[in-house]
Amino acid sequence: MLLITCPFCGPRDHVEFTYGGDATLTRPDPATASDADWADYIYLRDNPKGPHLEYWQHHAGCRAWLTVRRDTLTHEITMTAPARKAAGGESGAGEAGR
Amino acid sequence: MSRYSIFSLARHSLRGHRDWPRAWRDPEPKPRYDVIVVGGGGHGLATAYYLAKNHGIANVAVLEKGWLGGGNTGRNTTIVRSNYLHMANAQFYEHSLKLWEGLSRDLNYNVMFSQRGVVNLAHSDAQMDAHGRRGNAMRLNGIDAVLLDREAVRAMVPDLDFSPRARFPIYGALLQPRGGTARHDAVAWGYARGADARGVDIIQNCEVTGIKRDGATVIGVETSRGTIMAGKIGLAVAGNTGHVAAMAGLRLPIETHLLQAAVTEPLKPVLDTVVTSGAAHVYVSQSDKGELVFGGDLDFYNSYAQRGNLPAIANFTTALLALFPRFSRLRMLRSWGGVMDMTMDGSPIIGKTPLQNFYIDGGWCYGGFKATPASGWVFAHTIANDQPHKLNEAFTLERFASGHTIDEKGAGPYPGAH
């Protein structure tokens, strides 16, 4: 069981959360992005074996989107922060939706 | 290679089975090979076997970081089927099924392929329509498919919950009679023995730690047993394809995810086919040892851990008991996890890469076992000819950027959704 410490609700079982995938991707600017930029953004992943920045939504709690740093080999969680804050501003939160 | 037969069995039994020869050698790696296949699971070993058998390329090494078949070949639930909707998938997997049908004889190794049928349940009118469509598509591709009504399902699998209060009411099913199961370890061992007999070096406990490049050409690998040069290199390391390809500087449309399965204690014959339910997210068959082998969804987060968490097991076990209330008194014997290359469209990637002499066979999601023979067949062709076989020309790495995805489920670019 993963224990995710929600910054708003405290430590909670991961079944309260929905996984949102890689949190390092940045949506390209539609005004300037090429087809190749979009293909990279939509399809390609670093897929690291080790620390991974990823989104989780606390759907059964405060419903906030979080950015979590979790090791994909050991499942150890070393950081949990509100996604907006981790992305450095308001614009980051929208990236988490899917 | 000494052939296995009733006579060799009788001869060895008279000697108390004390002097069976090794099934394959344990060679030291040579400094250079024509082809290196990274990954000693079913796919890598099949590739080496067909390189030698179909293409006459025997100066080949298979490098395995652990032991043969210790990855996903030894962790899957052994189901073989070709009940696909899209043409590229249907024809590829049907070729695989045809190879399965002659595999034990071809390899002189009993892979215990049992065509007990695969029953895909429908729990609503809409699902019956979808199964009808899929069955028609399969038959147009020359694949066997039978649409069963509720009574026909009851005759085949009487232990399903047919009561009026069933959580998943049985409307019918799509049956592929030629589908079934096989002995997973035997597939790796049979291909290993066949490849070794044709001159392939199978090198275990040899982990690839780096890939050597000369510009855009791949020329060799760094391993835990030294540097080995190669004319061509093929990856067959599904689960770790992203990790190993990154050593060559490639980013792939793959996320690595965790999938679990479990077996019950052994019991007398109770289920003589494979039952799957897409709606309930579970599948089950009975092994030749009598255990019920069952599994369901991913754990749904990126992981290379080869071990999962209890919620996923609880989910598919609950679904199994909803379908088969009778199984509720069985005890679970063990559960295990494996890691899957989940691609962005749910279909594999078999083909060339932007690097010269470097080929990828991966992205098997959770359907790689049944593909083993055809995967090796077409990957060997791709490596030998530096161009894809007709059956894998759609499974390119470029299909994502060019919009030619093969999205069997229509789920979009979410790897966990396939």
Image (cartoon, coloured by chain):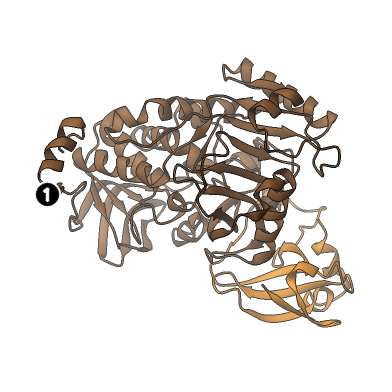
Chain colours: A orange, B brown
Q: Position of residue A46 (x, y in %)?
A: 59, 62
Residue pictured at 27% horizontal, 31% vertical: B53
Q: Is residue A92 above or below residue A27?
A: below
Q: Nearer the viewer, residue B290 or B93?
A: B290
Q: Is residue A11 above or below residue B398?
A: below
**Corner quadrant of residue A7:** bottom right
Q: Position of residue A5 (x, y in %)?
A: 76, 81
Q: Is residue B257 above or below residue B383?
A: below
Does dot 1 land on a helix, a strand or a loop?
loop
Image quarter where the N terminus of chain B lies is top left
Q: Nearer the viewer, residue B203 or B380?
A: B203
**Corner quadrant of residue B276:** top right
The answer to whether residue B397 of the structure is visible from this angle is no
Q: Chain of mark 1?
A: B
Residue pictured at 86% horizontal, 82% vertical: A8
Number of marks drawn: 1
The residue indicated by pointer 1 is B19
Q: Amino acid at mark 1?
A: Asp
**Corner quadrant of residue B160:** top right
Residue pictured at 26% horizontal, 58% vertical: B228
Q: Nearer the viewer, residue A43 or B154?
A: B154
Q: Position of residue B302 (x, y in %)?
A: 63, 63
Label 1: how many residues lie within 10 Å, few (<14), some (14-19) or many (20+)?
Answer: few
The answer to whether residue B118 of the structure is visible from this angle is yes
Q: Position of residue B197 (x, y in %)?
A: 19, 39
Residue B64 vs residue A98: left or right?
left
